[in-house]
Image (cartoon, helix red, strand yellow):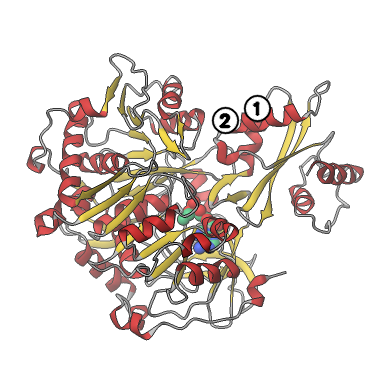
């Protein structure tokens, strides 16, 4: 059943909240050019002011042309210069109980300066590509800021990715330096980051320098001449900002690449540059999370994803916000860990993903009830469509039945939140991300590129460039054009389905391409297929996402083994481990169905639609184009017996 239809409660803005909110209704009337010009001038400190707001040569945009600035200066130094050095930038909570640290803006500046000076001594300069593979420790943010300070573009690789996934990214970006740590903490166990890094670096020959933070103290072998501990890199370095000044960067200089799954096996290097990205994330963070000097903000994502880049590191720091940074999982040591953190730091804004909310829902509200969550005044959601039931539960059990919930739609590519309510302004509808952020133009198109009417579904497109938009795919112009700009002329194709209701509000319906969304993480079906086919016993594989009440989607794979190989439970485990090794544990299929054949059209194309229907237990659509209709019946029987 479509639960979106069953839940029709509306939540108009609360008057008390609205009275002090950063946004009011007039924000939607602001002129696009005036909006992005004045936000950039008021929110960002420029070494040299920009001359031209933007230049649009489809499909490439440039923003704030002629400007010069530094992201680290904006996130750190200027707050200290303005007398806010004693304000806490991060309350860091390690996973082991009692392992915590408060880092002020002045403290952050000292650490960033020392580390940047150390990197400089190791040869990092403006333009040196750096890879970062770490857990959720303050040094991860420090490393990103130090790179930005020096003008060294970086790529952060999520600590849950495998050595092979890391190697692919390091090679693609031609990284010369890798910053990592001995191990990470996860649910009381350690994650072997340095061991993976060693494996990756052996396949990425351009990496000649590795910096290793000692986090768990359980030791990591160092390679003489190549590896340096973090402690040795910062030892003896000055913490005076003038000793390692912020490199003036052009507005359009590369800030970072973030690799994301697309519809082919190879992840795409999404390009983000300096001024537009920073303006976009600072502006959206300010209005959408209603940031004030008193805010204690917690985005419970991982910095390895775009959400962490934009809304744990750059947006909040640019706005001088106090944030919480948590290293571990929600149920370590107990299921009330998050609520303990909120009570301890008097968190006012919580931003997380529907999959996490549904997990807490499954555990039950009693864990939240053990804690005083009355400091919360605003909740946010991101990463996948939020089902109305989870939305209502979140507001009721976490938000004390009074906080606004902002459902924010965006992508790695958009860099910043694009579709969202504004708290204090927008009437909220559980399950709807409502409307485009000021200055953003979205629409829902049918196949022929016409806007659909109220109630109808179609494809979400973005009609006008925005400051934080990707500047392309790294070294792959053709794929950039094909992925985002070929379906419709001159508009950005998001890959998401959506519908508009009679108020003009948007409801996101999930991906329309071969990208899966598992626990809010983007994975490509083809990437998982390639990993499976790469196993010596696999003849053929097809991967689809099926609906899952908890994780949004779960990965189902259909595998044909080579002749003579037994479809045993041991083989199943082996294949799942193989995928984990190739990509990471997040990509491990929930089910593997062994089948003697895959359903194909007469021209030999695998019929994924049919496999999706089987996985979701749906009535099968048209099977007349199948080369051998018996194959589907066979798979259905096996899918049931092996589920
Ligand atoms: C999905 C994460 C519905 C969507 C920031 C998008 C959402 C993909 C929402 C991007 C939302 C993200 N409602 N769907 N509020 N937010 N998505 O690049 O399918 O990891 O295309 O960026 O997540 O995932 P990515």
Q: Which residue is mark 2?
A: 582
Residue 113's x, y, as percent? 16, 39
Where does residue 62 sit, x and y in percent of width and height?
32, 55
What's the CA distance linking mark 1 and mark 2? 9 Å
Residue in view at x 54 percent, y 48 percent: 522
Q: Circle 1: is it few (<14), some (14-19), or many (20+) Cα within 10 Å?
A: some
In this orientation, which residue lies closer to the viewer: 391 or 495?
391
Q: Nearer the viewer, residue 545 or 370?
A: 370
Q: Is residue 199 visible?
A: yes
Tell me if I can see residue 63 in this picture.
no
Label 1 with label 2: CB-CB less than 8 Å = yes
Q: Secondary structure at mark 1?
A: loop
Q: Is residue 600 placed above or below 502 in the rendered structure?
A: above
Placement of the N terminus among the 4 image quadrants: bottom right
Disc 1 C-beta below 8 A from ligand 1:
no
Looking at the image, residue 119 sits to the left or right of residue 494; the answer is left
Ligand 1 contact, mark 2 (Cβ < 8 Å): no
Pick whichever, 390 or 418, lies toward us.
390
- According to the picture, the residue beneath numbered tag 1 turns out to be 534
Look at the picture and state if 282 lies above or below 506.
above
Q: In the rendered structure, find residue 589 and report the number of the disc placed on it.
A: none
Q: Quadrant of the C terminus?
A: top right
Q: Is residue 73 left or right of residue 20?
A: left
Q: Residue at coordinates 35% horizontally, 80% vertically from top-left?
A: 17
Q: Residue 283's spot in the image, x, y percent? A: 30, 65
> Label 2: how many residues lie within 10 Å, few (<14), some (14-19) or many (20+)?
many
Image quadrant in which you'd find residue 299 = bottom left
Q: Against 582, is 452 above or below?
A: below
């Amino acid at each position: 059943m479509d639960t979106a239809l069953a839940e029709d409660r509306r939540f108009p803005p609360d008057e008390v909240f609205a009275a002090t909110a950063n946004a009011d209704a007039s924000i939607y009337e602001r002129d696009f050019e005036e909006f992005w010009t004045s936000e950039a001038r008021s929110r960002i400190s420029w070494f040299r002011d920009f001359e031209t707001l933007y230049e649009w040569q489809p499909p490439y945009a440039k923003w704030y042309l002629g400007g010069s600035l530094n992201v680290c200066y904006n996130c750190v130094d200027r707050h200290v210069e303005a007398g806010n050095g004693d304000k806490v930038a991060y309350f860091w909570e390690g996973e082991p109980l009692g392992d915590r640290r408060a880092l002020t803006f002045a403290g952050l500046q000292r650490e960033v300066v020392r580390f940047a000076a150390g990197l400089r001594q190791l040869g990092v300069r403006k333009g040196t590509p750096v890879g970062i593979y770490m857990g959720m420790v303050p040094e991860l943010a420090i490393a990103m800021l130090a790179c930005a300070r020096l003008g060294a573009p970086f790529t952060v690789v999520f600590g849950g990715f495998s050595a092979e996934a890391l190697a692919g990214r390091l090679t693609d970006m031609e990284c010369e330096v890798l910053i990592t740590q001995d191990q990470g903490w996860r649910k009381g166990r350690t994650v072997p980051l340095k061991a993976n890094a060693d494996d990756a670096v052996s396949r990425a020959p351009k990496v000649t320098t590795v910096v290793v933070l000692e986090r768990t103290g359980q030791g990591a072998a160092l390679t003489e001449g190549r590896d340096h501990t973090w402690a040795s890199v910062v030892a003896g370095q000055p913490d005076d900002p003038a000793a390692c000044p912020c490199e003036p960067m052009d507005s359009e200089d590369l800030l970072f690449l973030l690799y994301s799954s697309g519809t082919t096996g190879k992840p795409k290097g999404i390009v983000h540059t300096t001024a537009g990205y920073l303006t976009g994330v600072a502006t959206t963070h300010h209005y959408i999370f209603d940031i004030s000097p008193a805010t204690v903000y917690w985005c419970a994502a991982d910095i390895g994803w775009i959400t962490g880049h934009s809304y744990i590191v750059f947006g909040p720091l640019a706005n001088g916000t106090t944030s919480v940074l948590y290293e571990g999982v929600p149920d370590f040591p107990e299921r009330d860990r998050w609520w303990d953190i909120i009570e301890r730091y008097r968190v006012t804004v919580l931003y997380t993903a529907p999959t996490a909310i549904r997990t807490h829902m499954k555990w039950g509200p009693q864990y939240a009830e053990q804690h005083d969550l009355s400091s919360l005044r605003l909740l946010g959601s991101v990463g996948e469509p939020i089902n109305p039931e989870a939305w209502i539960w979140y507001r009721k059990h976490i938000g004390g039945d009074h906080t606004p919930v902002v459902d924010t739609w965006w992508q790695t590519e958009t860099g910043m939140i694009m579709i969202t309510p504004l708290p204090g302004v927008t009437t909220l509808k559980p399950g709807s991300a409502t409307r485009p952020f000021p200055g953003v133009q979205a629409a829902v198109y049918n196949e022929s590129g016409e806007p659909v009417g109220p109630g109808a579904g179609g494809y979400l497109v973005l009609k006008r460039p925005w400051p934080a938009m990707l500047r392309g795919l790294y070294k792959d112009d053709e794929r950039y054009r094909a992925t985002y700009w070929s379906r419709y002329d001159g508009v950005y194709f998001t890959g998401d389905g959506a519908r508009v209701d009679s108020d003009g509000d948007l409801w996101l319906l999930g991906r329309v391409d071969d990208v899966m969304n598992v626990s809010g993480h983007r994975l490509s079906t083809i990437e998982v297929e390639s990993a499976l086919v790469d196993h010596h016993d696999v003849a053929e594989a097809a991967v689809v996402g099926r609906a899952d009440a908890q994780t949004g989607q779960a990965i189902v794979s259909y595998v044909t083994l080579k002749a003579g190989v037994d479809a045993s439970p041991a083989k199943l485990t082996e294949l799942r481990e193989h995928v984990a090794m190739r990509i990471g544990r997040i990509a491990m299929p929930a089910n593997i169905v062994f089948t003697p054949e895959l359903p194909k059209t007469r021209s030999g194309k695998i019929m994924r639609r049919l496999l999706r229907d089987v996985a979701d237990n749906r009535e099968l659509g048209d099977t007349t184009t199948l080369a051998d209709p018996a194959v589907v019946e066979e798979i259905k029987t096996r899918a049931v017996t092996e589920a």
